[in-house]
């Protein structure tokens, strides 16, 4: 919870006014649950000039909505429309960022802007965005990333923090040759549930009720308070929770197209290498060489 001081202040205000808000902002589009994903709308109530649906963390000077032709440096860029956000640095690697962990104070119930999350019946969370780092302002000293939390109210239930080092491709530094570059993270529902159950065992909460929203944080950070520099721009953020995976059928027709052929071997190994999908063919709870053996027995038999 170390990066949520602004959100906590907001929660304290809500508590003081006796508001017990639970409602979520509905997905603006079936394909994207992020409000104002391209940052085009400015929040008229924000003295910092935040985009609608977003809130700067730590300091608005370094995390802000940008518009082509504005007065700030480096010059603003946008992938679509005229606006984006930029995240720069105070000169060291203290956390800076922009988050959806903010409430819509213009509608009853003050719903979170965080995208909705279905713990019990939903599938993987997939988040994407585009980033641009000017060659004149490369990121040095810290790393840029998108971090996710699933929450209920202000309680964290599970975290996907790229700074944990799980996937080096999720951490950005250097520059992008003055081009927009695509970024994507997938958070498997199985992993979320494992974390939630682990944290429940630690005594932080008990389920149900389940977490119901996804906090998105577009951030930059470095351990050890090292010197940092550079500016990253972000635009066109998407977040969607996929439908749950279909139950595993006959492993021989792994790609479920009705035939048993080489395509099934390929599909099986893609999942097996990722330790995912239906690759636990022998259903012993682990994914290892035994599953290759079990798969080929079925595949060579031409069916199940
Ligand atoms: Ca934009
Ligand atoms: Ca097949
Ligand atoms: Ca297995």
Image: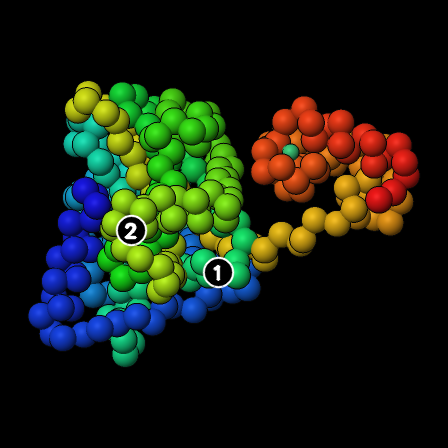
Q: Nearer the viewer, residue 193 or 25?
A: 193
Q: Is mark 2 within 8 Å of ligand 1?
A: no
Q: Is residue 304 left or right of residue 285?
A: right
The image quadrant where one finds the N terminus is: top left
Q: What element does badge 1 sit on?
A: loop
The image quadrant where one finds the C terminus is: top right
Q: Is residue 263 left or right of residue 45?
A: right
| Tag shown at residue 131 | none
Q: Is the residue marked by circle 2 packed among few (<14), some (14-19), or many (20+) residues within 10 Å?
A: some
Query: Can you identify the residue that label 1 sits on?
Result: 120
Image point (38%, 48%), residue name: 197
- Asked whether the residues under the numbered discs 1 and 2 touch, taking CB atoms below 8 Å apart as contact, a structural biologist would say no
Ligand 3 in which quarter: top right
The residue mark sitting in front, 1 or 2, is 1
19 in relation to 194, above or below: below
- Where residue 266 sits, quadrant-wise, is top right
Q: Is the residue marked by circle 1 packed among few (<14), some (14-19), or many (20+) residues within 10 Å?
A: few
Q: Earlier in the sequence, mark 1 or mark 2?
A: 1
Q: Is residue 37 left or right of residue 124?
A: left
Any part of residue 161 in sight: yes
Image point (87%, 49%), residue name: 258
Image point (82%, 40%), residue name: 252
Query: Can you identify the residue that label 2 sits on?
Result: 156
166 in relation to 14, above or below: above
* Place of residue 302 in the rendered image (x, y in percent of width and height, measured from the top left): 90, 39
Q: Residue furthest front?
A: 284
């Amino acid at each position: 919870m170390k990066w949520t001081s602004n959100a906590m202040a907001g929660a304290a205000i809500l508590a003081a006014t006796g508001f017990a808000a639970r409602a979520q902002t509905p997905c603006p589009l079936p394909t994207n649950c992020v409000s104002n994903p391209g940052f085009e709308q400015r929040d008229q109530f924000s003295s910092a000039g935040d985009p609608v649906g977003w809130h700067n963390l730590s300091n608005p000077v370094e995390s802000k909505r940008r518009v082509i032709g504005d007065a700030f440096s480096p010059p603003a860029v946008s992938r679509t429309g005229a606006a984006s956000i930029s995240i720069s640095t105070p000169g060291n690697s203290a956390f800076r960022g922009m988050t959806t962990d903010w409430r819509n104070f213009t509608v009853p119930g003050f719903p979170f802007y965080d995208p909705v999350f279905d713990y019990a019946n939903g599938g993987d969370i997939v988040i994407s965005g585009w980033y641009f780092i000017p060659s004149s302002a490369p990121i040095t000293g810290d790393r840029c990333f998108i971090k996710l939390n699933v929450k209920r109210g202000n309680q964290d239930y599970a975290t996907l923090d790229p700074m944990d080092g799980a996937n080096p491709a999720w951490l950005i530094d250097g520059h992008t040759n003055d081009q927009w570059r695509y970024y994507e993270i997938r958070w498997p529902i199985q992993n979320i549930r494992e974390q939630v159950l682990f944290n429940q065992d630690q005594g932080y909460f008990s389920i149900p009720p389940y977490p119901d929203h996804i906090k998105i944080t577009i951030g930059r950070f470095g351990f050890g308070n090292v010197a940092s520099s550079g500016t990253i721009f972000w635009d066109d953020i998407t977040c969607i929770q996929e439908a749950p995976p279909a139950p595993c059928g006959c492993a021989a027709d792994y790609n479920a197209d009705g035939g048993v052929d080489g395509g099934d071997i390929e599909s099986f190994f893609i999942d097996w290498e990722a330790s995912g999908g239906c690759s636990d063919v022998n259903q012993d709870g682990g994914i290892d060489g035994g599953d290759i053996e079990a798969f080929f027995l079925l595949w060579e038999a031409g069916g199940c």
